Amino acid sequence: MGVMSTVSSGQHTRPMCYLLLLMILQLGLHTAEGVWPLPQTLISSTERFHLSPQAFYFGYGRQSAAQQGCSVLDAAFKRYFALIFPDYTSGRWNLFSDKNESKILLQICLCCFTGLESFSQLVYQDDFGSYFVNKTDIKDFPRFQFRGILLDTSRHYLPVQAILKTLDAMAYSKFNVFHWHIVDDPSFPYQSRTFPDLSSKGAFHPMTHIYTQSDVRRVISHARMRGIRVLPEFDSPGHTKSWGKGQPDLLTPCYKGGIPSGTFGPINPALPSTYHFMATLFKEVSVVFPDSYIHLGGDEVDFSCWKSNPYVRAFMQKMGFGSDFTKLEAFYMENIVNITSALNKTSIVWQDVFDYHERVSTPQQITHINYEVRSTYYAELSRMTKAGMRVVLAAPWYINHISYGQDWHNYYTVQPLNFSGTEEQKKLVIGGEVCMWGEYVDATNLTPRLWPRASAAAERLWSDEKQTSNVDMAFPRLQDFRCKLVRRGIQAEPLYVGHCKQEYQGI
Amino acid sequence: MGVMSTVSSGQHTRPMCYLLLLMILQLGLHTAEGVWPLPQTLISSTERFHLSPQAFYFGYGRQSAAQQGCSVLDAAFKRYFALIFPDYTSGRWNLFSDKNESKILLQICLCCFTGLESFSQLVYQDDFGSYFVNKTDIKDFPRFQFRGILLDTSRHYLPVQAILKTLDAMAYSKFNVFHWHIVDDPSFPYQSRTFPDLSSKGAFHPMTHIYTQSDVRRVISHARMRGIRVLPEFDSPGHTKSWGKGQPDLLTPCYKGGIPSGTFGPINPALPSTYHFMATLFKEVSVVFPDSYIHLGGDEVDFSCWKSNPYVRAFMQKMGFGSDFTKLEAFYMENIVNITSALNKTSIVWQDVFDYHERVSTPQQITHINYEVRSTYYAELSRMTKAGMRVVLAAPWYINHISYGQDWHNYYTVQPLNFSGTEEQKKLVIGGEVCMWGEYVDATNLTPRLWPRASAAAERLWSDEKQTSNVDMAFPRLQDFRCKLVRRGIQAEPLYVGHCKQEYQGI
């Protein structure tokens, strides 16, 4: 209001001014477009409050357990102030607004980060740049406790800055688990204190393509400030080619015609030194990554190299495994699970470990991630929950797979509990995960490939399924949310023809 | 070399230094990875020249027709110096190199921008940061004269900066035509001097989502400096919904039950005022866009609205078209072609105009663009060239269509002349065009979606087909070229697992 009245006063005799007014009337009033992901209950009214950036502040309620000095919340207040009033914080705000009018004290009750996020999404600007929030009553909680995003920093290195930016965007969609698939066959970017050769020889570059201890701390701290836990994955015994470069005798030498061929297979499960190494590595990892979860991989193990190696075969005989190499893998995984259990970690493994190795012990501790991308994941969910496994569903959210058109529909219409099973079984599905595997993804295309497509999965994992079953209803709200992401500096790609008031400026 | 000897002198008693030396020896020497798109003839040797940024300059030969003061070349020299020596121009260069050694005078013969581009791709840095170029003999010319990229600024607005950046990247791949699909149904961002209402009412926003006259001049000038012509498209009579907002009585009112339904169809071909408007608009456009080509569209005209309108039907009767609405469209297109011919422009239209309206006159002047995305484009090429039409092939290069994996193979393996026809017919295929339609593309994802996938088409349009028939041979060279794009600040996405020495930093 302030801006307009200033423009018209002193100029109101010039026809130009009327033209301007006319256009503004045509543009009409904006109202809040909603919150993404949709809260469990949201009752909004047309009654609106004028917010003045000059007077607005977040404070702690008298009854609040947290008080000033709670660094996580203090920082969140500051961050969300800047997100809500970007013009003001960038110094582009002008001071024409009527201070008396805008000094309304709003008392809102926010119980966590996600409440702050919802509130921030409710604030909007009218065509004069004034900030408003409509009177809104929200009661909210997530449908699933585990709402993850996997980034793969082995197939391509992602600069720390790209990870931090992803964490920012994750918080906007209320994701709360960053599954860091940090190492794999192509490269080992994690710089270990205990085994520095793993990255100095196994990373794409020993200095520019690594995560130092301080990088990791920075990622974990950035995530923690946003209510996101960091789940590290050190996948073994397969997917470990890069480990072998810096750790001699770790991988299995493959044989051809009775002699070593010079190539290497999965980690060698037949050597005591292997378990000593893994115990030492995981001891470090369990301190560096304080989260109670740890991901041990266990997927896609190719047995051919083990089969070719006479020492591995001799070990099989000694252990009484016959020629069943799944028993060897189960033996290996059991050892690794025991190592991490002793470190008070809850192990997570890929589905394979359940599929082929039902004898792996302490199933209560293991949360499987279903990772097959196919329409049969309902059957897998039935089978795994029936066996009492806690499950995180990833299969329908392999978001690195792209196709032309509005493929967010596919991510949105997943029904995670639509498998046959008891109520008890359904409770074992603790959440879901969006996987961004790195074959074709690095810092150049990560963000537009991830957002807003991952946000479709975010709503599925957070919101009530009945209230969010219709893609056509979701579309304008997601489109609006995508514009909010762009406004916040996230390079989120468009859903379809159209525009945002504030387009992406980071070219 | 300078850097290393400085580090080792004074420190050579410390073991750390030997370790450093050892690592550098391991990294080995880099050599030139080649030029993309592949020159017609390239003979390289292992003999290499040390280039010193301090001493290097581009100059004009004594025999050169162009001399100092030729602004286009002077600017190109400056630009390419910065591309070749980015460390130097950013002030990160250090002065340890031996000046006597590096003051070798290189005499190279470059005949155009594309020669400069090839030369710039041949320069490389060794592991010490020194610049080298191997002795190389290149004879080069493009296979096709028309090598275009279409951007669609109607379905999403692209900021001028995004267009300029695309022009930069186009020059790196030796594209030479920017086909600017500037307006369409969703929005009319071109700010016309003569008809300002077209954009003030038809753009997504009358101020932030338009191209002013000065914006257009900037684009054309930026393109010209890089040897790129700008081909504007004002598509009609279909794809014109946005035109109707700012120009009353231009579109055909659709009828339902004998009365106007309130909706509008294609441009009204039955009114003299239409042709007066189009002539006035194209008169302006032909001056603003000085290129001799102009694209008139003519695609995907829906006849249902014309059919519903009694005045259009009466006009059909008067003209003796019976109920054949293709005749009406041909009549319209003929008028538009005549308007632009009178302005000394060569008209380009989409394939439809040929398919349905063979009676449109002056076929020599019309270059058709085959736009059907299907495997039958060979048949279309045969048919159109048989009729004597000059053709630009776009069908296999609809690059807005995405799929998972290395889909650049599809763009690379196109054989534009592999249709049945005489030598004369084949000469009528003057080139090809990569189309980036804008339904799902704006400034957030344009660049990674375009590059390096479009570069695959660029090589097909530039290079000898026999020398570039193998995708496996092309892969490492394209991967290297992609890293060059990233180093030059182009957000080009990765082709597969791996890394670049200099990763994308623009997060």
Image: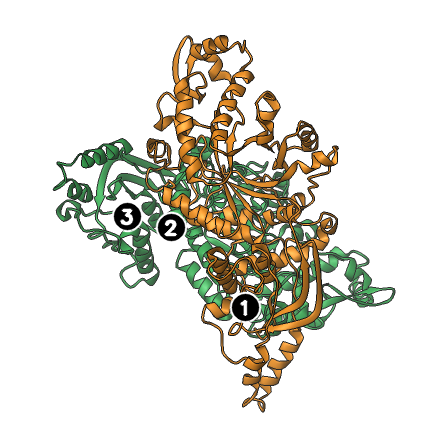
Chain colours: A green, B orange
Front: mark 3 or 1: 1
Q: Is residue A498 above or below residue A312?
A: above
Residue B405 seen in the figure: no
Chain letter for mark 1, please: A
Q: Position of residue B386 (x, y in %)?
A: 69, 28
Judged left or right of residue A137, residue A344 is right
Outermost residue on the right side: it is A257
Q: Residue type at mark 3: give it.
A: Cys
Q: Position of residue A5 (x, y in %)?
A: 16, 41
Residue named by callout 1: A208
CA gap between label 2 and label 3 equals 24 Å
Q: Are marks 1 and 2 on the same chain?
A: yes
CA gap between label 1 and label 2 equals 28 Å
Q: Are marks 3 and 1 on the same chain?
A: yes
Residue named by callout 3: A109
Instruction: Answer few, some or many: residues within 10 Å of disc 2's Cα (few below 14, many 20 plus, some between 14 and 19).
Output: some
Chain letter for mark 2, please: A
Front residue of this view, candidates B149 and A459: B149
Q: Position of residue A373 (x, y in %)?
A: 63, 43
Residue named by callout 2: A488
**Picture quarter with the N terminus of chain A:** top left
